[in-house]
Image: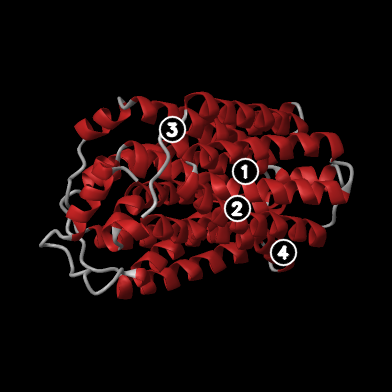
């Protein structure tokens, strides 16, 4: 970690307005943020796991359901860089609580949706919550633990992402098949309510410091390394979501798996993501370039394997597991790069830009993937994912971070 980053975080930890952290890191609050990421990612990608029955029930195409992800992503892209500015007078714990309330509301609206417009309205609410949460989560981690424990805290928070990929896709598909897709959204709402209770108990008072402004967002965006990181995020995230949004359709069509087997394959994706998160944290400690470049390269290899060996159920299962492992490592490397390495003194601004970029990439990927799905088939979406992911890895190898993080 850079010396300036360490100095900044030490200054935050010793701010007189902050709760006394000399007694130890606030791990309970860190875990509550991990629960928040779990709930948000579960809600964001739940439509993918119940794609077929949801489309049938609402009498719309699978590609149209995929645009529910697009709506969330577009709103999230707007919310991420602006929410920290809009809420700058507020204690940051209040902002987190508000985002979790919006998460619960979105899941309830999705569960009762009887038409595409109602579903899209629910996804708008979720987009606001996503952008607001992701824009400040890394900056909060910097205030909850000492600097030498920061990467561990970030890994724990991002474990919520991998936990969601372990649970959301297979459980969503299974619950949707047994009790209906609406029940899956109601379960997600209950998880959000539990998360809110934990956050109310554990997150300490966090008055705003280093207030984000639109000017600071522009300043961070001019950082050359941030520009490269943004390009990498756009490539890898758009490639992933252009194809994984429709992975259930691929599994039903090419290896022709039944719903129970699809649930197991999606579970393997999630388990792979869990271990990928751990591997990403390890790599970020030792080689930031490897942490940012290897995951998209593995995604490219996995999608090519699906295109060439997709008729084999075993080959498909292995490729999807590798894909999950790789994608589980993506957020750790990229967030460490953007927030903690490239712009540590402006963590909320950098976090907002990263969240906005991810959401733009999700929207672009879902739109493009939906068009490919409806007009050229799911294999074309996988081909785009392979190309975009390879270009992301190549960009990191050529233009990525030169200095390695220092461990303490």
Question: Which quadrant would residue 166 be assigned to in this image?
Answer: bottom right
Please indicate whether residue 283 sits to the left or right of residue 315 in the image: left
For residue 65, the mark is 1
Please indicate whether residue 276 sits to the left or right of residue 39 in the image: right
Question: Which quadrant would residue 343 be assigned to in this image?
Answer: top left
Which mark sits nearer the N-terminus, 4 or 2? 4
**Residue name at image x 68 percent, y 34 percent:** 300
Which mark sits nearer the N-terminus, 3 or 1? 1
Give how far across and how far down residue 1 sits, in percent. 35, 46
Q: How crowded is mark 4: few (under 14 residues within 10 Å), some or many (20 or more)?
A: many
Give how far across and how far down residue 169 sits, in percent. 65, 57
Residue linked to disc 4 = 174
Q: Which of marks 2 and 3 is in front?
A: 3
Q: Which of marks 4 and 1 is in front?
A: 4
Q: Is mark 3 on a helix, strand or loop?
A: loop
What distance separates the C-alpha of mark 3 from that of mark 1?
A: 38 Å
Please indicate whether residue 347 sits to the left or right of residue 186 in the image: left
Which mark sits nearer the N-terminus, 2 or 3? 2
């Amino acid at each position: 970690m850079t010396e300036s980053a360490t100095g900044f975080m030490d200054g935050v930890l010793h701010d007189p307005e902050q709760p006394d952290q000399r007694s130890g890191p606030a791990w309970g609050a860190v875990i509550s943020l991990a629960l928040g990421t779990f709930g948000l990612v579960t809600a964001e990608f739940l439509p993918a796991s119940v794609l077929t029955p949801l489309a049938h029930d609402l009498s719309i195409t699978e590609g149209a359901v995929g645009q529910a992800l697009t709506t969330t992503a577009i709103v999230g892209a707007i919310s991420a860089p602006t929410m920290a500015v809009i809420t700058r007078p507020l204690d940051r714990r209040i902002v987190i609580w508000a985002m979790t309330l919006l998460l619960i509301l979105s899941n309830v609206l999705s569960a009762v949706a009887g038409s595409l417009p109602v579903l899209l309205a629910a996804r708008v609410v979720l987009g606001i919550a996503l952008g607001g949460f992701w824009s400040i989560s890394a900056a909060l981690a910097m205030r909850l633990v000492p600097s030498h424990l920061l990467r561990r805290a970030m890994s724990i928070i991002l474990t919520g992402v991998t936990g969601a990929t372990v649970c959301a896709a297979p459980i969503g598909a299974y619950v949707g098949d047994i009790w209906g897709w609406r029940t899956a959204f109601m379960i997600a709402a209950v998880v959000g309510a539990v998360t809110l209770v934990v956050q109310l108990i554990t997150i300490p008072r966090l008055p705003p410091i280093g207030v984000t402004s639109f000017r600071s967002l522009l300043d961070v965006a001019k950082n050359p390394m941030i520009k490269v990181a943004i390009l990498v995020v756009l490539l890898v995230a758009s490639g992933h979501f252009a194809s994984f949004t429709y992975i259930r359709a691929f599994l039903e069509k090419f290896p022709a798996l039944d719903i129970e087997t699809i649930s197991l394959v999606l579970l393997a994706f999630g388990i792979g993501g869990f271990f990928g998160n751990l591997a990403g944290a390890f790599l970020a400690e030792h080689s930031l370039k490897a942490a940012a470049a290897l995951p998209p390269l593995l995604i490219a290899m996995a999608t090519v394997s699906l295109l060439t060996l997709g008729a084999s159920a075993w080959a498909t299962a292995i490729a999807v597991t590798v894909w999950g492992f790789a994608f589980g490592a993506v957020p750790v490397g990229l967030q460490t790069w953007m927030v903690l390495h490239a712009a540590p003194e402006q963590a909320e601004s950098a976090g907002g830009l990263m969240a906005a970029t991810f959401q733009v990439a999700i929207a672009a990927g879902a739109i493009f993937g939906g068009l490919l799905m409806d007009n050229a088939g799911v294999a074309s979406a996988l081909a785009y994912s392979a190309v975009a992911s390879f270009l992301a890895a190549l960009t990191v190898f050529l233009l990525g971070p030169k200095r390695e993080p220092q461990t303490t």
